[in-house]
Image (cartoon, helix red, strand yellow):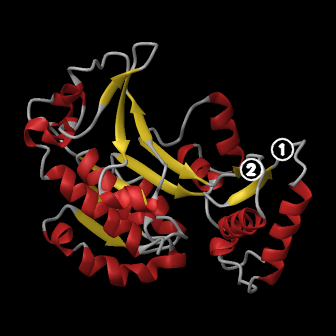
Amino acid sequence: MSGPYTVMGYCNQMMATLSKVQGKHHLDQVPVRQLPNGQVAARVLPRPIWDHLLLSGVKVDVWMQPEVTPVNPAHYTAAAYDAANPRFKIGRLALVLGAGNIAAIAPLDVFQKLFAENEVVMLKMNPVNDYLIGFLTPALKPLIDRGFLCIVRGATDVGEYLCNHPLVESIHITGAGASHDAIAWGVGSEGLANKAASTPRNTRHITSELGAVCPTIVVPGPWSAADIRFQAEHVATQKLHNSGFNCIACQVLVTPREWNQKVEFLSALEDVMAQSEARQLYYPGAD
């Protein structure tokens, strides 16, 4: 579900947007309002009926930069598709270092580079899940055939070679902080010295989505027994999905200091996790 479904959902939304981007008609159904500080906010979710059904009660606003006014959002959105925008006259070659866990991340990073940043992509899969190449190659064949995308496999030596290749102009990495630091600053004493002096070994434009310690915050209230069980299952799932080897996994649970149902909730959570089927650790060697 977190692999194919997420990619297909993104593709459906992207097709809907790009089919209307000429003339900036993708903004036609986006409500815009001004916040008390004068900043413009655009309501981007919910849109189709599926948003209302699957994300009931959830609303998402994009808060725009100060120069955006209620009448000029078209000037500041979908800039990659403005022929007159000098920033996007010349494309670049991006190296995407794919994630080793969630199957959707690597193709979604590729789409970001291709369709939002006007860059062609060399995608190097993580050895842990390079079996995905067998699925991504036919799925992304139109991009590969046109020369916009190339998918390669290899270990750390291949990644290091590509990160320092003269044709690569930007890098995106999804992975561990140590991997990012090795690319940007170097390894060992050299890396420590470069980081301390703010003199990166690799001066390319690097974006990164690195491992995190994500909290789940429990809001107190008069919860029913069904509420407690339902939310305990939710929190357990956040932690147990992929054995917790996930940058958005729940790693810290924040509970109210004063809540008369806190012990009841924590006991229910412990019960759910104790009753759940044991899972193998995701990454080889992690045990």
Instruction: Decide: is 58 above or below 205.
Output: below
Horizontal and vertical percent position of residue 253 = 78, 54
**Residue 134 vs residue 215, the one in the foreground:** 215
Q: Which mark is residue 44?
A: none
* Three-letter residue code for mark 1: Pro
Q: Which mark is residue 218?
A: 2
**Secondary structure under the numbered disc 2 in the rendered image:** loop
Quadrant location of residue 244?
A: bottom right
| Camera-side residue of 206 and 141 | 141
- Give coordinates of residue 24: x percent, y percent: 14, 37
Residue 133 visible, this orientation? yes
Q: Choose the circle earlier in sequence order: 1 or 2.
A: 2
| Left or right for 61, reference 195 | left
Separation of disc 1 and disc 2 at Cα? 7 Å
Are discs 1 and 2 less than 8 Å apart at CB?
Answer: yes
Which residue occupies the extreme top position in the image?
37
Q: Name the residue under label 1.
A: 256
Q: Residue at x 13, y 40 (%)?
A: 25
